[in-house]
Image: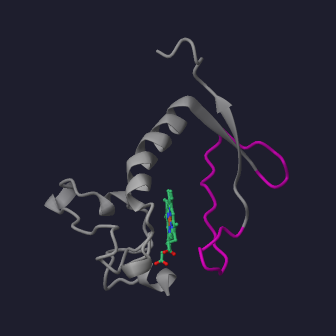
């Protein structure tokens, strides 16, 4: 059901397009802002659930994730390893995003990445 809601054109403009800015509360191109929140009040987007059993770690997650993600991207390169173990970084391949059925919309094929530190811990520019 969540899968279907997330792709329902009644709630999402061009639902299959990758438009992360659709979740931004900042003024976007075309002068539109998103008023949709993830706190369980807007049922078209409920990554933390809703109601009495809503995720109690919601606030912690929202505080921690941007910093964690930013630090991870800043400090590591990720080498993608295809199932044939061939490293394909550096070419123009588009990341395969096929899905298979499941509660959490899992990837059809695992994405295997090797994190490679790209900043010296002692000499961060
Ligand atoms: C991005 C991070 C997270 C996501 C997407 C997430 C998502 C969810 C979802 C969907 C539920 C089920 C809610 C429902 O049944 O309606 C849940 C429950 C729960 N989450 Fe999270 N969660 C996250 C992080 C955390 C963190 C950081 C903690 C604790 C430090 C946490 C603790 C819990 C607990 C204890 C429950 C069970 C609540 C209950 O059944 O009453 N979660 N979470």
Colour pattern of the rendering: one colour
Q: What stretch is highlighted in magenta?
A: 82-108
Residue 66: image location, x then y, percent: 41, 45
Q: Residue furthest right?
A: 84
Quick one: 86 or 40, which is closer to the camera?
40
Q: Quadrant of residue 103?
A: bottom right
Instruction: Report which quarter residue 13 is drawn in.
Output: bottom left
Residue 102 included in the magenta stretch of the image: yes
Q: Work out whether residue 15 or residue 51 is closer to the camera in this orientation and state it.
A: 51
Q: Is residue 90 shown above or below 21?
A: above
Residue drawn at (37%, 80%), measured in percent from left and top?
51
Q: How many marks?
A: 0
The residue located at (49%, 35%) in the rendering is: 71
Up-down relation of residue 86 to residue 28 (above or below) = above
Q: Residue farthest to the top?
A: 123
Q: In this view, does 81 lie to the left or right of 16?
A: right
Is residue 121 placed above or below 58 in the rendered structure?
A: above
Report the residue at 49% width, 43% height from top. 69
Residue 64: image x %, image y %? 43, 46
Residue 7 visible in the current orientation: no
- Secondary structure mostly taken by the magenta-highlighted segment of the chain: loop
Q: Can residue 57 be seen in this view?
A: yes
* Residue 105 image offset from top left, x and y in percent: 60, 74
Q: Residue furthest left?
A: 31
Q: Is residue 92 magenta?
A: yes
Residue depicted at 64% across the width and 70% down the height: 106
From the top left corner, tell me how far across and down residue 108 is, in percent. Answer: 70, 70
């Amino acid at each position: 059901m969540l899968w279907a809601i997330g792709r329902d054109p009644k709630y999402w403009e061009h639902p299959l397009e990758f438009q992360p800015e659709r979740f931004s509360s900042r003024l976007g191109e075309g002068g539109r802002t998103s008023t949709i929140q993830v706190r369980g009040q807007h049922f078209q987007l409920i990554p933390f659930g809703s109601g009495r059993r809503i995720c109690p770690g919601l606030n912690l997650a929202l505080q921690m994730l941007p910093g964690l993600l930013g630090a991870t991207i800043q400090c590591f390169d990720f080498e993608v390893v295809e199932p044939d173990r061939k490293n394909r970084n550096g070419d123009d391949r588009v990341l395969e995003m096929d899905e298979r059925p499941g509660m959490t919309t899992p990837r059809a094929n695992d994405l295997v990445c090797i994190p490679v530190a790209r900043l010296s811990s002692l000499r961060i520019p």
